[in-house]
Amino acid sequence: MFARVSFPISSFKSFTYKIPASLNGTVQPGTCVNAPINRRMQAGFVVAVNPDSEYKGKILPIDSIREKELQFPEELWHTLEWISQYYITPLGQVLKAAVPNSFLKLYKPKQVQFVKITTKGLNVIPTFENKKPAQKRLLKALSNINEPVKTASLTEFASSPHTVCGQLEKSGLVETLSQPQITDPFEIMGPGDIQNIQLSKEQQGVVDTIQNTGKGFHPYLLHGVTGSGKTEVYLKLAQTTVEDGQSVLVLVPEIALTPQVAVRFRKAFGSRVALWHSRMTKAEKGWTWQQLKKGEYSVVVGARSAIFAPLKNLGLIIVDEEQESSYKQENPAPRYHARDVAMVRGKQANAIVLLTSATPCLESYYNALQKKFTLLKLTKRYGKSNYPAVELVDMKKEYSDDGSALLSKSLTEAINDRLEKSEQVIILQNRRGYSRVHQCLECGEIKKCENCSVALTFHRTDNNLHCHYCESVEIPESNCNKCTAENMTFAGSGTQRVEDVMQQNFPNADILRMDMDTVRRKGSHLKILEQFANGKADILLGTQMIAKGLDFENVTLVGVINADSGLFFPDFRAGERVFQLIYQVAGRAGRRDKPGLAIIQTYNPDDVYIQTAAALNTKKFYNVSLAQRQELTYPPFSRIGRILFTGENKLIVNNFAQMVGRKLQGNVNYKILGPAPAPLEKIKGNWRAHLIIKSKNRNISSLHQFIHSTIGFTIFERKWRGVRIQIDVDPVSML
């Protein structure tokens, strides 16, 4: 018997090995083996087993099975094969992305002490003696938590929780135990009570529709207005799935930025929930992956790469906020989209797949119209909350002494009104830093990063210019590099400048800022959200990370500083993203019985995307956008592939792009746009050119065949004269 083995390298080749007699029957597709390659032993995965081999040269034997526990579930293995074919990526690279680097290392996480109350402890609380107040406080706290809690986290109830817990354990009132310490983004929020989920009639109708469909693969798109209770719907479905003995996979755009969703699952399922997020170390990911292989968890909540979690008996996949671009992997390969992979994995696993959003992406909405997905709707806000009123402000009519008004009169008055009523405000400015450009007033020259073709952003925190792409830092100069005039100014506004202006205008207000600069430290994002949720701040100012997934009952006003941000990007999805952002952030206002107001500031009040978002008119948005896409033959009415050329020598990069472009020309079924310089022509010292392949034939295999027959796939394996060539199927970013 012979096995073809793929290694985690950027080659489309697999290598043939003999299967030793001692391993016959145990080696199958997906098995992780040790095999010799390039005179050293390396871990690889078996991709096929055959009785014969066409290779006539010397065939070496497989050395051993690396780890018996690393056998992939069959449905996941087939999904990984699909990713390799669809995204034109060597299977070895797909496996490298799917399996944590540290999965082969023996990792034992640090054990820390947890504590839980006993039945005896629960019974003695009413009669517990008041002479021991710390013990009584701790018992009361533990009685409200239905899972073990870290002893060290109980300092709020006892100054020396380990000592107090030791005393209570001697009396049999609590039980201590050791559990592995895995980085937990919910740690500061703590566990909570399991709550009975009360559904509205409309929510129950959605749940019944899905549950009455029966077992097997069924794709759904849940289109629910902001505040309609989509989370309650899929939480209920998850509970039923787990009760039936199946597992659940929940994808969120970024677990650190959508904590309320993840916390709800933690409360409902306790220790049966595994978390998968960017703050975990490689070793922790490896350990969690192995625990999943053993079936230790019923539910996984995680970001994009959690789609590879080796859950057994998968019954339900949820993709929350499915329109989010963060589900698309940009670099390195495979450049997969987790939403699309979820559909394939669901089909392979015979599982239900539920996409949810208040603003589904055009591709998903079109698939629902074409009956590829079943469209389910939640048209009413949950409970007593109503839609917010929306006011559009034309900033061309607003003036200030320096000619650059940041806050309109309407927004200023509305903020003052909310502060007087002790209500809260959310302000969106989707640019971080203080000033977006450092510009010469004489010649107009804008200071750019030397490594990247982007303007440097001024940050007030250190009074330096920062590049948000390569992280380089420069000291601002008073003289222009081009004309030497001493007339440099800071223009454009980021969150730091908006914060300054708001502190001047509302000196008595407590303001929290949430952007990439304030959430760098571990747990900082949750601390900010917790402070705001507890009423310790009046205004939450931030970038798009505050626009969705958050629910604060005392927020009655949302302000958008500049709705035009991103509107004129050279990307056919620019208008769609602006609509989604405005619609979503407006939905943060008026989440309970208090009326909400959203004020949208813009210099383009007649733009159709801004108008439809301000009117909360999703139907008109989809009609207009789909008509535009169809006229220009962009997805969902075509398939596109993007080929990106990068290298340190601009001339060689452009020459290679031209050569590949010529090879692709000549087929009437495919339109080639470019090659041309990429909108971001230089990043981290590398010049960038790109071309777009557009096909009206939506069958993706035809696009693959066209690329393979004209330029082949090996062109993507390595650098050519210093130029790296990358393929991106179904690209999300055109920059």
Image (cartoon, rainbow, N blue to C red):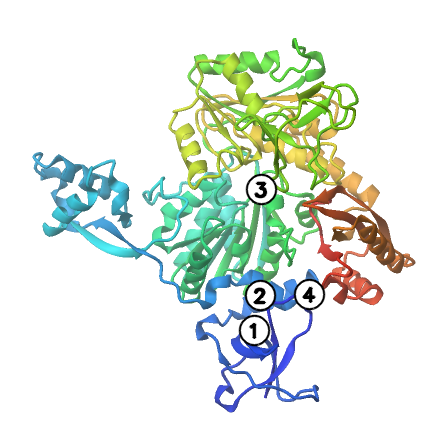
Q: CA distance from mark 1 to mark 2?
A: 8 Å
Helix, strand or loop under label 2: helix
Question: In this figure, which residue is indicated by the disc labeled 4?
Answer: 85
Q: Nearer the viewer, residue 639 or 501?
A: 501
Secondary-structure class at tag 4: helix
Question: What residue is shown with label 1?
Answer: 45
Question: Which residue carries the number 2 mark?
Answer: 95
Amino acid at dot 2: Leu
Name the mark nearer the viewer: 4 or 2: 2
- Amino acid at dot 3: Ser
* Amino acid at the residue labelled 1: Phe
Task: Tell me which numbered mark, 3 or 2, is placed earlier along the sequence.
Answer: 2
Residue behind mark 3? 357
Q: Are marks 1 and 2 in contact (CB under 8 Å)?
A: yes
- Residue 713, horizontal then vertical, whole percent: 76, 65
Q: Is residue 82 visible?
A: yes
The span from disc 1 to disc 4 (Cα, nearest Å) is 16 Å
Tell me the crowding category of disc 3: few under 14, some 14 to 19, or many 20 or more residues within 10 angstroms, Cα based. Answer: many
Q: Picture quarter containing residue 399?
A: top right
How far apart are the alpha carbons under marks 3 and 2?
30 Å
Is tag 4's residue or tag 2's residue first in the polypeptide sequence?
4
Quarter of the image where the N terminus is located: bottom right
* Of marks 3 and 4, the one in the foreground: 4
Q: Is residue 108 left or right of residue 11?
A: left
Q: Residue at x 45, y 39 (%)?
A: 521
Residues under labels 3 and 4: Cα distance? 29 Å
Would you say the residues marked 1 and 4 are in contact, meaning their CB atoms lie under 8 Å apart? no
Tell me if 729 is positioned left or right of 214 in this view. right
